[in-house]
Amino acid sequence: MSKKIHIFDTTLRDGEQVPGAKLNKRQKIEIAQQLANLRVDVIEAGFPCSSPGDLDAVREISRQVEGPVIAALARAVKEDIDIAWQAVREAKRPRIHVFLGSSDIHIQKKLRSDRDKALEMAVGAVKYAKSLCDEIEFSTEDGSRTDFEFLCRIIDETIKAGACVINVPDTVGYALPEEFGSLIAKLRQSVPSLDRVLLSVHCHNDLGLAVANSMAAIRNGADQVECTINGIGERAGNASLEEIVMVLKTRSENYQAQTSIDTREIYRTSRMVSRIMNIPVQPNKAIVGSNAFSHSSGIHQDGVLKDRTTYEIMKPEELGIKQQTIVLTARSGRAALRHRLQELGFTLEAQIFERVYNRFIDVADRKKEINALDLQSIVEIEVSKVPETYKMHSIQIMSGNKMVPLASVTLERDGQLYTDAATGNGPVDAVFKGIERITGVPGKLRDYDLKAVTMGTDALGEAMVRVEMGDDIYSGIGSSPDVIEASARAYLNACNRYFANGGATGIQNPGDINC
Protein backbone atom coordinates (compact mmCIF):
# COMPACT_ATOMS: atom_id res chain seq x y z
CA MET A 1 0.00 0.00 0.00
CA SER A 2 1.33 3.45 -0.97
CA LYS A 3 2.12 5.74 1.97
CA LYS A 4 1.20 9.44 1.95
CA ILE A 5 4.20 11.76 2.37
CA HIS A 6 3.21 15.21 3.62
CA ILE A 7 4.93 18.11 1.84
CA PHE A 8 5.76 20.98 4.21
CA ASP A 9 6.84 24.00 2.17
CA THR A 10 9.05 26.54 3.93
CA THR A 11 9.82 28.76 0.93
CA LEU A 12 8.17 31.74 2.64
CA ARG A 13 10.15 31.25 5.87
CA ASP A 14 13.48 29.48 5.37
CA GLY A 15 13.62 30.39 1.68
CA GLU A 16 13.10 34.06 2.44
CA GLN A 17 16.21 34.09 4.62
CA VAL A 18 18.38 34.35 1.48
CA PRO A 19 19.97 37.84 1.42
CA GLY A 20 18.05 40.11 -0.97
CA ALA A 21 15.03 37.79 -1.18
CA LYS A 22 12.87 39.70 1.33
CA LEU A 23 9.23 39.73 0.25
CA ASN A 24 6.47 42.23 0.90
CA LYS A 25 3.00 41.15 2.00
CA ARG A 26 1.50 41.10 -1.49
CA GLN A 27 4.33 38.95 -2.84
CA LYS A 28 4.07 36.47 0.04
CA ILE A 29 0.33 36.11 -0.52
CA GLU A 30 0.88 35.60 -4.26
CA ILE A 31 3.38 32.80 -3.66
CA ALA A 32 1.20 31.26 -0.94
CA GLN A 33 -1.78 31.14 -3.32
CA GLN A 34 0.38 29.34 -5.89
CA LEU A 35 1.63 26.89 -3.25
CA ALA A 36 -2.03 26.12 -2.54
CA ASN A 37 -2.54 25.52 -6.27
CA LEU A 38 0.46 23.19 -6.12
CA ARG A 39 -1.39 21.38 -3.31
CA VAL A 40 1.33 21.38 -0.68
CA ASP A 41 0.10 20.03 2.66
CA VAL A 42 1.62 22.75 4.85
CA ILE A 43 2.75 26.31 4.13
CA GLU A 44 5.17 27.68 6.70
CA ALA A 45 4.18 31.27 6.05
CA GLY A 46 6.85 32.99 8.13
CA PHE A 47 8.47 33.76 11.46
CA PRO A 48 6.00 36.34 12.84
CA CYS A 49 8.08 37.50 15.80
CA SER A 50 10.87 38.60 13.43
CA SER A 51 9.05 41.78 12.38
CA PRO A 52 5.61 43.45 12.38
CA GLY A 53 5.62 43.14 8.58
CA ASP A 54 6.06 39.38 8.71
CA LEU A 55 3.32 39.10 11.34
CA ASP A 56 0.97 41.04 9.08
CA ALA A 57 1.87 38.91 6.03
CA VAL A 58 1.33 35.61 7.84
CA ARG A 59 -1.98 36.87 9.22
CA GLU A 60 -3.20 37.80 5.71
CA ILE A 61 -2.10 34.43 4.29
CA SER A 62 -4.06 32.76 7.10
CA ARG A 63 -7.13 34.75 6.13
CA GLN A 64 -6.90 34.39 2.37
CA VAL A 65 -5.27 31.06 1.52
CA GLU A 66 -7.37 27.92 1.80
CA GLY A 67 -6.40 24.28 1.51
CA PRO A 68 -3.01 23.77 3.17
CA VAL A 69 -2.24 23.98 6.87
CA ILE A 70 -0.82 27.45 7.61
CA ALA A 71 2.11 27.27 10.03
CA ALA A 72 4.07 29.96 11.84
CA LEU A 73 7.50 29.43 13.40
CA ALA A 74 8.22 30.31 17.03
CA ARG A 75 11.11 29.91 19.42
CA ALA A 76 10.34 27.99 22.61
CA VAL A 77 9.36 31.15 24.48
CA LYS A 78 5.91 32.43 25.43
CA GLU A 79 6.22 35.77 23.58
CA ASP A 80 7.06 34.08 20.26
CA ILE A 81 4.25 31.57 20.65
CA ASP A 82 1.71 34.31 21.41
CA ILE A 83 2.72 36.20 18.27
CA ALA A 84 2.66 33.03 16.16
CA TRP A 85 -0.87 32.25 17.35
CA GLN A 86 -1.94 35.81 16.64
CA ALA A 87 -0.68 35.32 13.07
CA VAL A 88 -2.35 31.98 12.26
CA ARG A 89 -5.44 31.90 14.47
CA GLU A 90 -7.75 32.88 11.57
CA ALA A 91 -6.54 30.06 9.32
CA LYS A 92 -8.96 27.18 8.78
CA ARG A 93 -6.10 24.80 9.64
CA PRO A 94 -3.54 26.62 11.85
CA ARG A 95 -0.29 25.17 13.19
CA ILE A 96 2.29 26.58 15.59
CA HIS A 97 5.80 25.31 14.87
CA VAL A 98 8.01 25.50 17.97
CA PHE A 99 11.75 24.85 17.76
CA LEU A 100 14.61 24.52 20.24
CA GLY A 101 18.24 23.50 19.82
CA SER A 102 18.77 19.95 21.10
CA SER A 103 22.43 19.23 20.34
CA ASP A 104 24.99 19.87 23.07
CA ILE A 105 26.68 22.54 20.97
CA HIS A 106 23.39 24.43 20.61
CA ILE A 107 22.36 23.93 24.24
CA GLN A 108 25.73 24.94 25.68
CA LYS A 109 26.94 27.57 23.22
CA LYS A 110 23.70 29.17 22.02
CA LEU A 111 21.28 28.65 24.88
CA ARG A 112 23.95 28.78 27.64
CA SER A 113 22.06 25.97 29.36
CA ASP A 114 22.09 22.22 30.01
CA ARG A 115 20.04 19.26 28.80
CA ASP A 116 17.60 19.16 31.72
CA LYS A 117 16.78 22.86 31.43
CA ALA A 118 16.45 22.58 27.64
CA LEU A 119 14.04 19.65 28.05
CA GLU A 120 11.98 21.61 30.58
CA MET A 121 11.93 24.60 28.23
CA ALA A 122 10.79 22.46 25.26
CA VAL A 123 8.02 20.71 27.19
CA GLY A 124 6.76 23.97 28.70
CA ALA A 125 6.69 25.66 25.29
CA VAL A 126 4.76 22.81 23.65
CA LYS A 127 2.24 22.68 26.50
CA TYR A 128 1.65 26.42 26.28
CA ALA A 129 1.31 26.32 22.48
CA LYS A 130 -1.13 23.41 22.78
CA SER A 131 -3.32 25.52 25.07
CA LEU A 132 -3.77 27.94 22.16
CA CYS A 133 -3.75 25.73 19.06
CA ASP A 134 -4.70 22.11 18.42
CA GLU A 135 -1.91 21.42 15.94
CA ILE A 136 1.63 21.78 17.30
CA GLU A 137 4.89 20.83 15.59
CA PHE A 138 8.10 20.60 17.60
CA SER A 139 11.54 20.74 15.97
CA THR A 140 14.71 19.42 17.58
CA GLU A 141 17.04 21.95 15.98
CA ASP A 142 20.36 20.33 14.98
CA GLY A 143 18.74 16.95 15.56
CA SER A 144 21.24 15.06 13.40
CA ARG A 145 24.06 16.08 15.78
CA THR A 146 22.07 15.51 18.99
CA ASP A 147 22.99 12.77 21.49
CA PHE A 148 20.67 9.90 20.55
CA GLU A 149 19.40 9.12 24.05
CA PHE A 150 18.61 12.77 24.70
CA LEU A 151 16.97 13.08 21.27
CA CYS A 152 14.68 10.14 22.13
CA ARG A 153 13.90 11.69 25.50
CA ILE A 154 13.01 15.16 24.21
CA ILE A 155 10.88 13.70 21.40
CA ASP A 156 8.93 11.46 23.78
CA GLU A 157 8.36 14.22 26.33
CA THR A 158 7.17 16.80 23.76
CA ILE A 159 4.76 14.24 22.29
CA LYS A 160 3.34 13.74 25.78
CA ALA A 161 3.10 17.52 26.09
CA GLY A 162 0.88 17.72 23.01
CA ALA A 163 3.02 17.83 19.85
CA CYS A 164 1.36 16.08 16.91
CA VAL A 165 4.32 16.55 14.53
CA ILE A 166 7.95 15.93 15.47
CA ASN A 167 10.60 17.34 13.17
CA VAL A 168 14.22 16.10 13.14
CA PRO A 169 16.32 18.58 11.15
CA ASP A 170 19.77 18.17 9.67
CA THR A 171 20.18 21.87 10.39
CA VAL A 172 23.74 22.33 9.13
CA GLY A 173 23.64 19.74 6.34
CA TYR A 174 26.21 17.53 8.09
CA ALA A 175 24.57 14.11 7.82
CA LEU A 176 25.21 11.47 5.18
CA PRO A 177 22.23 9.61 3.68
CA GLU A 178 23.07 6.27 5.30
CA GLU A 179 23.54 8.00 8.68
CA PHE A 180 20.36 10.04 8.47
CA GLY A 181 18.26 7.13 7.25
CA SER A 182 19.61 5.00 10.09
CA LEU A 183 18.80 7.75 12.60
CA ILE A 184 15.15 7.88 11.49
CA ALA A 185 14.87 4.07 11.63
CA LYS A 186 16.39 3.97 15.13
CA LEU A 187 13.99 6.68 16.34
CA ARG A 188 11.05 4.66 15.03
CA GLN A 189 12.29 1.62 16.95
CA SER A 190 13.24 3.46 20.15
CA VAL A 191 10.36 5.94 20.61
CA PRO A 192 7.02 4.07 20.49
CA SER A 193 5.06 7.31 20.90
CA LEU A 194 6.20 8.36 17.39
CA ASP A 195 3.55 5.98 16.06
CA ARG A 196 0.91 8.47 17.27
CA VAL A 197 2.31 11.51 15.43
CA LEU A 198 3.83 12.55 12.13
CA LEU A 199 7.63 12.24 11.93
CA SER A 200 9.12 15.03 9.84
CA VAL A 201 12.60 15.85 8.49
CA HIS A 202 14.16 19.14 7.39
CA CYS A 203 17.46 18.77 5.53
CA HIS A 204 19.91 21.47 4.50
CA ASN A 205 22.17 21.27 1.48
CA ASP A 206 25.59 22.31 2.80
CA LEU A 207 27.18 19.11 1.42
CA GLY A 208 24.75 18.83 -1.50
CA LEU A 209 22.88 15.96 0.19
CA ALA A 210 19.58 17.53 1.26
CA VAL A 211 17.42 15.61 -1.21
CA ALA A 212 19.38 12.37 -0.72
CA ASN A 213 19.01 12.66 3.07
CA SER A 214 15.29 13.39 2.73
CA MET A 215 14.78 10.35 0.50
CA ALA A 216 16.73 8.16 2.95
CA ALA A 217 14.46 9.44 5.72
CA ILE A 218 11.33 8.61 3.73
CA ARG A 219 12.61 5.10 3.09
CA ASN A 220 13.17 4.65 6.83
CA GLY A 221 9.87 5.94 8.16
CA ALA A 222 9.55 9.74 7.78
CA ASP A 223 5.97 10.93 7.18
CA GLN A 224 6.68 14.55 6.26
CA VAL A 225 9.50 16.35 4.43
CA GLU A 226 10.21 20.05 4.81
CA CYS A 227 11.50 21.61 1.62
CA THR A 228 11.48 24.71 -0.59
CA ILE A 229 10.78 25.56 -4.20
CA ASN A 230 14.02 25.40 -6.23
CA GLY A 231 15.80 24.32 -3.03
CA ILE A 232 16.30 27.94 -1.96
CA GLY A 233 17.28 28.82 1.60
CA GLU A 234 20.05 30.29 3.66
CA ARG A 235 23.62 29.14 3.04
CA ALA A 236 23.50 26.34 0.43
CA GLY A 237 19.73 26.03 0.63
CA ASN A 238 17.20 23.33 1.51
CA ALA A 239 15.92 20.11 0.03
CA SER A 240 14.25 20.87 -3.30
CA LEU A 241 10.50 20.24 -3.30
CA GLU A 242 10.29 19.48 -7.00
CA GLU A 243 13.12 16.93 -6.84
CA ILE A 244 11.63 15.04 -3.88
CA VAL A 245 8.16 14.99 -5.45
CA MET A 246 9.38 13.79 -8.85
CA VAL A 247 11.63 11.11 -7.34
CA LEU A 248 8.60 9.71 -5.54
CA LYS A 249 6.50 9.92 -8.70
CA THR A 250 9.10 8.57 -11.12
CA ARG A 251 10.46 5.82 -8.84
CA SER A 252 7.32 5.08 -6.85
CA GLU A 253 7.99 1.34 -6.89
CA ASN A 254 11.13 1.89 -4.80
CA TYR A 255 9.51 3.95 -2.06
CA GLN A 256 5.88 2.82 -1.97
CA ALA A 257 5.01 6.44 -1.22
CA GLN A 258 3.21 9.30 -2.93
CA THR A 259 2.33 12.96 -2.40
CA SER A 260 -0.72 15.10 -3.11
CA ILE A 261 1.26 17.57 -5.23
CA ASP A 262 -0.21 18.64 -8.58
CA THR A 263 3.00 18.24 -10.58
CA ARG A 264 1.57 20.27 -13.48
CA GLU A 265 1.99 23.35 -11.28
CA ILE A 266 5.68 22.72 -10.52
CA TYR A 267 7.21 24.68 -13.39
CA ARG A 268 4.97 27.71 -12.90
CA THR A 269 5.68 27.74 -9.16
CA SER A 270 9.42 27.49 -9.81
CA ARG A 271 9.31 30.40 -12.23
CA MET A 272 7.22 32.53 -9.89
CA VAL A 273 9.53 32.01 -6.91
CA SER A 274 12.62 32.64 -9.03
CA ARG A 275 11.22 35.92 -10.36
CA ILE A 276 9.68 37.33 -7.19
CA MET A 277 12.67 36.44 -5.03
CA ASN A 278 15.11 37.23 -7.86
CA ILE A 279 17.03 33.99 -7.41
CA PRO A 280 17.93 32.54 -10.83
CA VAL A 281 17.48 28.81 -11.43
CA GLN A 282 20.71 27.31 -12.74
CA PRO A 283 20.27 25.91 -16.28
CA ASN A 284 21.26 22.36 -15.27
CA LYS A 285 18.98 22.33 -12.20
CA ALA A 286 17.14 19.01 -11.97
CA ILE A 287 13.45 19.06 -12.96
CA VAL A 288 13.03 22.82 -13.56
CA GLY A 289 16.32 24.01 -15.11
CA SER A 290 16.17 25.36 -18.66
CA ASN A 291 18.35 22.47 -19.85
CA ALA A 292 16.37 19.75 -18.05
CA PHE A 293 14.62 18.70 -21.29
CA SER A 294 17.19 19.95 -23.82
CA HIS A 295 19.23 17.62 -26.00
CA SER A 296 22.31 18.77 -27.91
CA SER A 297 24.05 15.48 -28.64
CA GLY A 298 23.23 14.11 -32.08
CA ILE A 299 22.77 10.62 -30.69
CA HIS A 300 20.39 11.94 -28.03
CA GLN A 301 18.46 14.06 -30.52
CA ASP A 302 18.03 11.09 -32.84
CA GLY A 303 16.78 8.92 -29.98
CA VAL A 304 14.34 11.55 -28.68
CA LEU A 305 12.92 12.13 -32.15
CA LYS A 306 12.22 8.40 -32.46
CA ASP A 307 10.89 7.96 -28.92
CA ARG A 308 11.22 10.54 -26.10
CA THR A 309 11.57 7.80 -23.50
CA THR A 310 15.02 6.92 -24.92
CA TYR A 311 16.53 9.89 -23.06
CA GLU A 312 13.70 11.38 -21.00
CA ILE A 313 12.38 9.75 -17.83
CA MET A 314 9.72 12.42 -17.29
CA LYS A 315 7.37 14.23 -19.65
CA PRO A 316 7.64 18.05 -19.70
CA GLU A 317 3.84 18.19 -19.63
CA GLU A 318 3.84 16.46 -16.22
CA LEU A 319 5.57 19.54 -14.82
CA GLY A 320 3.37 22.06 -16.59
CA ILE A 321 5.94 22.86 -19.30
CA LYS A 322 3.67 23.50 -22.28
CA GLN A 323 4.63 22.85 -25.88
CA GLN A 324 5.14 26.04 -27.91
CA THR A 325 2.73 25.86 -30.84
CA ILE A 326 1.10 29.31 -31.20
CA VAL A 327 3.17 32.38 -31.99
CA LEU A 328 1.89 35.91 -31.44
CA THR A 329 3.06 39.02 -33.29
CA ALA A 330 2.55 42.77 -32.94
CA ARG A 331 -0.50 42.38 -35.20
CA SER A 332 -2.19 40.11 -32.65
CA GLY A 333 -4.99 41.95 -30.88
CA ARG A 334 -6.19 41.87 -27.31
CA ALA A 335 -8.54 38.94 -27.97
CA ALA A 336 -5.74 36.74 -29.32
CA LEU A 337 -3.45 37.71 -26.47
CA ARG A 338 -6.14 37.04 -23.85
CA HIS A 339 -6.91 33.64 -25.44
CA ARG A 340 -3.23 32.66 -25.41
CA LEU A 341 -2.86 33.79 -21.81
CA GLN A 342 -5.82 31.63 -20.81
CA GLU A 343 -4.24 28.66 -22.60
CA LEU A 344 -1.11 29.24 -20.52
CA GLY A 345 -3.20 29.37 -17.34
CA PHE A 346 -3.14 33.15 -16.72
CA THR A 347 -6.33 34.96 -15.73
CA LEU A 348 -5.51 38.64 -15.31
CA GLU A 349 -7.44 41.60 -13.94
CA ALA A 350 -8.24 44.28 -16.53
CA GLN A 351 -5.62 46.75 -15.27
CA ILE A 352 -2.83 44.17 -15.21
CA PHE A 353 -3.91 42.82 -18.62
CA GLU A 354 -3.52 46.29 -20.13
CA ARG A 355 0.00 46.54 -18.69
CA VAL A 356 0.83 43.14 -20.14
CA TYR A 357 -0.69 44.08 -23.50
CA ASN A 358 1.26 47.35 -23.74
CA ARG A 359 4.51 45.60 -22.82
CA PHE A 360 3.70 42.78 -25.27
CA ILE A 361 3.24 45.28 -28.13
CA ASP A 362 6.46 47.08 -27.18
CA VAL A 363 8.46 43.83 -27.25
CA ALA A 364 6.67 42.41 -30.33
CA ASP A 365 7.51 45.51 -32.37
CA ARG A 366 11.17 44.63 -31.96
CA LYS A 367 11.15 40.85 -31.62
CA LYS A 368 8.51 40.20 -34.31
CA GLU A 369 7.35 36.87 -32.85
CA ILE A 370 6.39 36.20 -29.24
CA ASN A 371 6.21 32.56 -28.17
CA ALA A 372 4.97 30.99 -24.93
CA LEU A 373 8.17 31.48 -22.92
CA ASP A 374 8.47 35.13 -24.00
CA LEU A 375 4.86 35.75 -23.02
CA GLN A 376 5.27 33.99 -19.70
CA SER A 377 8.29 36.17 -18.91
CA ILE A 378 6.38 39.35 -19.76
CA VAL A 379 3.34 38.36 -17.68
CA GLU A 380 5.27 37.26 -14.62
CA ILE A 381 7.35 40.45 -14.52
CA GLU A 382 4.32 42.71 -14.95
CA VAL A 383 2.27 40.81 -12.35
CA SER A 384 5.04 40.87 -9.74
CA LYS A 385 5.98 44.54 -10.15
CA VAL A 386 6.13 46.77 -7.12
CA PRO A 387 4.64 50.31 -7.32
CA GLU A 388 6.76 52.28 -9.76
CA THR A 389 8.11 55.48 -8.28
CA TYR A 390 10.13 55.82 -11.49
CA LYS A 391 9.21 54.34 -14.88
CA MET A 392 11.59 53.57 -17.71
CA HIS A 393 11.13 55.99 -20.62
CA SER A 394 14.22 55.68 -22.81
CA ILE A 395 17.96 55.05 -22.85
CA GLN A 396 20.62 55.95 -25.40
CA ILE A 397 24.09 54.41 -25.44
CA MET A 398 27.37 55.41 -27.04
CA SER A 399 29.91 52.62 -26.65
CA GLY A 400 32.82 50.93 -28.36
CA ASN A 401 36.14 49.25 -27.65
CA LYS A 402 38.03 52.51 -28.29
CA MET A 403 35.87 54.90 -26.24
CA VAL A 404 34.50 55.40 -22.75
CA PRO A 405 30.86 54.21 -22.72
CA LEU A 406 28.28 56.97 -22.27
CA ALA A 407 24.61 56.46 -21.40
CA SER A 408 21.75 58.96 -21.48
CA VAL A 409 18.81 57.82 -19.33
CA THR A 410 15.29 59.27 -19.19
CA LEU A 411 12.91 58.21 -16.41
CA GLU A 412 9.33 59.25 -15.72
CA ARG A 413 8.07 60.23 -12.29
CA ASP A 414 4.59 61.60 -11.59
CA GLY A 415 4.13 62.39 -15.30
CA GLN A 416 7.37 64.37 -15.58
CA LEU A 417 10.49 63.27 -17.48
CA TYR A 418 13.98 63.44 -15.99
CA THR A 419 17.10 62.94 -18.08
CA ASP A 420 20.72 62.57 -17.07
CA ALA A 421 23.89 61.03 -18.47
CA ALA A 422 26.84 59.13 -17.06
CA THR A 423 29.95 57.28 -18.16
CA GLY A 424 30.94 53.85 -16.92
CA ASN A 425 33.28 50.90 -17.31
CA GLY A 426 30.79 49.47 -19.81
CA PRO A 427 27.38 50.40 -21.24
CA VAL A 428 25.47 48.60 -18.47
CA ASP A 429 27.55 50.30 -15.77
CA ALA A 430 26.95 53.67 -17.45
CA VAL A 431 23.18 53.07 -17.50
CA PHE A 432 23.15 52.08 -13.83
CA LYS A 433 25.05 55.25 -12.91
CA GLY A 434 22.62 57.34 -14.97
CA ILE A 435 19.71 55.83 -13.03
CA GLU A 436 21.52 56.56 -9.77
CA ARG A 437 21.99 60.22 -10.74
CA ILE A 438 18.29 60.67 -11.44
CA THR A 439 16.92 58.75 -8.45
CA GLY A 440 19.51 60.08 -6.01
CA VAL A 441 20.05 56.60 -4.58
CA PRO A 442 23.60 55.20 -4.71
CA GLY A 443 23.70 51.44 -5.04
CA LYS A 444 26.36 48.76 -4.83
CA LEU A 445 25.79 45.91 -7.30
CA ARG A 446 26.06 42.60 -5.45
CA ASP A 447 24.89 40.18 -8.13
CA TYR A 448 24.05 40.36 -11.83
CA ASP A 449 22.61 37.61 -13.99
CA LEU A 450 21.61 37.76 -17.65
CA LYS A 451 20.07 34.96 -19.69
CA ALA A 452 18.08 34.41 -22.85
CA VAL A 453 14.47 33.35 -22.35
CA THR A 454 14.33 31.63 -25.74
CA MET A 455 16.67 30.70 -28.60
CA GLY A 456 17.90 32.90 -31.44
CA THR A 457 19.60 36.24 -31.93
CA ASP A 458 16.34 38.09 -31.22
CA ALA A 459 15.71 36.18 -27.98
CA LEU A 460 14.13 38.03 -25.08
CA GLY A 461 16.86 38.80 -22.55
CA GLU A 462 16.06 38.50 -18.85
CA ALA A 463 18.25 40.33 -16.34
CA MET A 464 18.31 39.89 -12.56
CA VAL A 465 20.23 42.11 -10.15
CA ARG A 466 20.78 42.33 -6.42
CA VAL A 467 21.76 45.82 -5.25
CA GLU A 468 22.83 47.06 -1.83
CA MET A 469 20.98 50.29 -1.02
CA GLY A 470 21.22 51.74 2.44
CA ASP A 471 21.34 48.90 4.96
CA ASP A 472 19.55 46.30 2.84
CA ILE A 473 19.87 44.37 -0.40
CA TYR A 474 17.11 44.75 -3.01
CA SER A 475 16.50 42.53 -5.99
CA GLY A 476 15.24 43.52 -9.42
CA ILE A 477 14.24 41.84 -12.66
CA GLY A 478 13.68 43.10 -16.19
CA SER A 479 13.30 41.75 -19.71
CA SER A 480 13.74 43.09 -23.22
CA PRO A 481 15.11 41.99 -26.61
CA ASP A 482 17.86 44.55 -25.84
CA VAL A 483 20.03 43.20 -23.03
CA ILE A 484 21.12 46.68 -21.92
CA GLU A 485 17.49 47.76 -21.62
CA ALA A 486 16.70 44.53 -19.73
CA SER A 487 19.55 45.32 -17.34
CA ALA A 488 18.31 48.90 -16.90
CA ARG A 489 14.77 47.70 -16.17
CA ALA A 490 16.10 45.24 -13.60
CA TYR A 491 18.16 47.92 -11.84
CA LEU A 492 15.20 50.33 -11.84
CA ASN A 493 13.00 47.56 -10.46
CA ALA A 494 15.44 47.19 -7.54
CA CYS A 495 15.32 50.96 -6.97
CA ASN A 496 11.52 50.90 -6.91
CA ARG A 497 11.62 48.06 -4.36
CA TYR A 498 13.85 50.30 -2.23
CA PHE A 499 11.34 53.16 -2.47
CA ALA A 500 8.39 50.82 -1.79
CA ASN A 501 10.18 49.70 1.38
CA GLY A 502 10.28 53.25 2.65
CA GLY A 503 13.55 54.47 1.11
CA ALA A 504 13.79 58.21 0.55
CA THR A 505 13.39 59.47 -3.01
CA GLY A 506 15.29 62.39 -4.34
CA ILE A 507 16.96 63.96 -7.35
CA GLN A 508 20.70 64.50 -7.32
CA ASN A 509 22.26 67.36 -9.27
CA PRO A 510 18.93 68.96 -10.23
CA GLY A 511 20.74 71.46 -12.39
CA ASP A 512 21.77 68.67 -14.74
CA ILE A 513 18.20 67.43 -15.25
CA ASN A 514 16.30 68.19 -18.45
CA CYS A 515 12.58 68.15 -17.68
Image (cartoon, grey):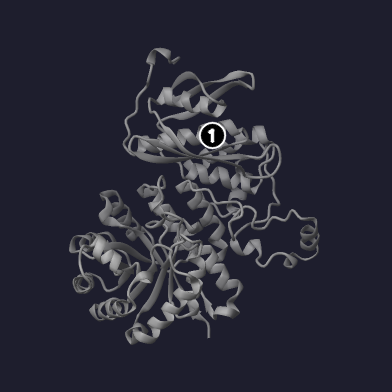
Q: In the rendered view, would you say 104 is above or below 323? A: below
Can you say whether 64 is above or below 429 in the image?
A: below
Asked whether residue 496 appears in the rendered view, the answer is yes
Locate residue 384, reporting x and y percent.
46, 45
Which residue is pictured at 29% across the width and 77% down the height? 150
Q: Image quadrant of residue 188?
A: bottom left
Against 489, residue 269 (above or below) is below
Q: Nearer the viewer, residue 502 or 441?
A: 441
Comparing 108 with 424, the one in front is: 108
Query: Which residue is rendered at x = 73% and y = 68% of the image?
Result: 309
Going by the image, does 98 lie left or right of 268? left
Question: Percent position (x, y) of residue 368?
Answer: 69, 36
Q: Residue at x 34, y 39 (%)?
A: 501
Amino acid tagged 1: Ser
Q: How many marks?
A: 1
Horizontal arrangement in the rendering, residue 127 relative to residue 217 (left or right): left
Toward the top, the furthest residue is: 511
Residue 107: percent from left, percent from top = 25, 66
Instruction: Give x and y (percent) for residue 176.
Output: 48, 70
Q: In the rendered view of the protein, which quadrant contains the C terminus?
A: top left
Q: Is residue 262 visible?
A: no
> Taking 313 as reference, is 385 above or below it?
above
Pick the residue in front: 92 or 124.
124
Q: Is residue 162 left or right of residue 330?
A: left
Residue drawn at x 34%, y 87% as measured from the top left: 192
Q: Which residue is mark 1?
A: 487
Would you identify the image quadrant in which residue 386 lies? Answer: top left
Left/right of residue 457 with respect to residue 152 in the rendered view: right
Q: Quadrant of residue 103?
A: bottom left
Q: Residues within 10 Å of mark 1 (few under 14, many from 20)?
A: many
Q: Secondary structure at mark 1?
A: helix
